[in-house]
Image: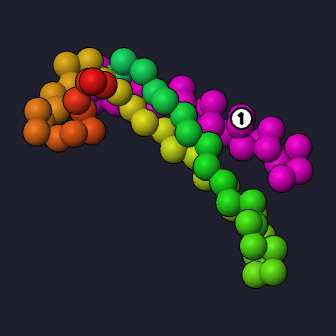
Amino acid sequence: MPIDLYVAMMQLVLVVGEAIPLALRGRGIDVARINYQDNSNWCYFPSRNQSPQVHIHLYVRTFNEKHPESDPRFRPFP
């Protein structure tokens, strides 16, 4: 990815990262933190002649979250 495109993407992520807590708090959701995850597919198979893809996930964590005890994704590590 060209550096100027990457910088523009990160600037957009920063703007969205500031807007999400404002929007959610306006709806009464108390945001504790946001985790950012940058995923990409940099053409592992160049023979397929596809351009690289990139996308960002923002995971919002809130205070007073409730998770089902039966769900293994939320159990503490052994």
- Number of disc labels: 1
Residue at (75%, 73%) from the top-left corner? Answer: 45
Viewer-nearest residue: 26 or 76: 76
Residue 66 spot, x, y in % from top left: 15, 28
Residue stretch rendered in magenta on the structure: 1-30
Q: Left or right: 24 with respect to 45?
A: left
Q: Is residue 22 visible?
A: no
5 magenta-colored: yes
Residue 62 spot, x, y in % from top left: 30, 23
Residue designated by label 1: 11
Residue at (48%, 38%) from the top-left corner? Answer: 58
Q: Quadrant of residue 46?
A: bottom right
Residue at (56%, 39%) from the top-left corner? Answer: 37
Q: Left or right: 32 with respect to 78?
A: right
Residue 71 spot, x, y in % from top left: 17, 41
Viewer-nearest residue: 6 or 25: 6
Secondary structure category for the residue under label 1: helix
